[in-house]
Image (spheres, rainbow, N blue to C red):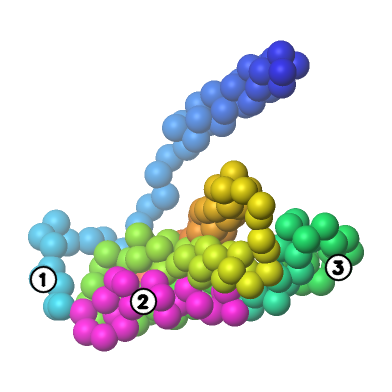
Amino acid sequence: MLVIVGIWFLISVPLSLAGSWLGFRQPLPDPPVKTNQIPRQIPPAQGYLRPLPSVLVVGILPFAASFLELYFIMSSLWSSRIYYMFGFLFLCYGLVVVTSAAASILIVYFILGNEDYRWQWRAFAASGGSGVYVFLYCLVYWARRVSFSSWTGGVLYLGYSALLAGLWFVLSGTVGFMACWAFVHRIYGSLKVD
């Protein structure tokens, strides 16, 4: 335990401090166009452009790209089976990244077309919404495939499932946000404003 704490203090803390020092010294990226100081009135969103429906609609696409592979991973974790398809897992990971990016770019395009300029958190949450589906899939897997002899196993399963779903949310949300950020800078950078 002392070795792990020592590794954390000798490697992780100095690298975190060096990274934050370098990050704060970098200049801010210039916006692609000049923005108005007075914010525009945003029309109310209709249908799937509201926050919750957009998260649910966009979130199902990255989950659908990987739910079969998630079954094999859950079987190897909880049913003592050997997982041997790492090449297919890498392919599935690439598919999830591409699907998260494409779906979040699409919803941000529709949001910007609806004259809503607050796209940043919506892009992160919409693409990260697949983490909700991963957690629901973990609950369904628990109900159908896994049985625990005590409540401790169930608490442990729920904790690991929530951790997995949270990490999935952050991963796919970050991919969606970064893709949308590049997309918005690209489309507004190509505008010629006099």
Amino acid type, residue under disc 3 in the picture:
Met
Q: Residue at 48% across / 73% down in the picture?
A: 59
Q: Residue at 27% across / 64% down in the picture?
A: 118
Residue 129 position in % (x across, y down): 45, 67
Q: Label 3 crowding class (10 Å Cα cut-off): few <14, some 14-19, many 20+? A: few
Residue at which label 1 appears? 41
- Choose top left, top right, bottom left or bottom right for residue 187: bottom left
Q: Earlier in the sequence, mark 3 or mark 2?
A: 2
The reply to whether callout 1 and callout 3 are in contact (CB within 8 Å) is: no
Amino acid type, residue under disc 2 in the picture:
Ser
Residue at which label 3 appears? 85
Q: Secondary structure at mark 3?
A: loop
Q: Quadrant of the N terminus?
A: top right
Q: Earlier in the sequence, mark 1 or mark 3?
A: 1
Between residue 166 and residue 141, name the one nearer to us.
141
Q: Check if residue 40 falls in the magenta segment.
A: no
Name the front one of labels 3 and 2: 3
Between residue 170 and residue 35, name the one nearer to us.
170
Residue 31 position in % (x across, y down): 35, 57
Q: CA distance from mark 1 to mark 3?
A: 51 Å
Residue at which label 2 appears? 54
Q: Secondary structure at mark 1?
A: loop
Name the front one of labels 2 and 1: 2
Q: State the extent of the magenta-drawn residues as a range.
A: 45-64
Q: Residue at 26% across / 76% down in the picture?
A: 50
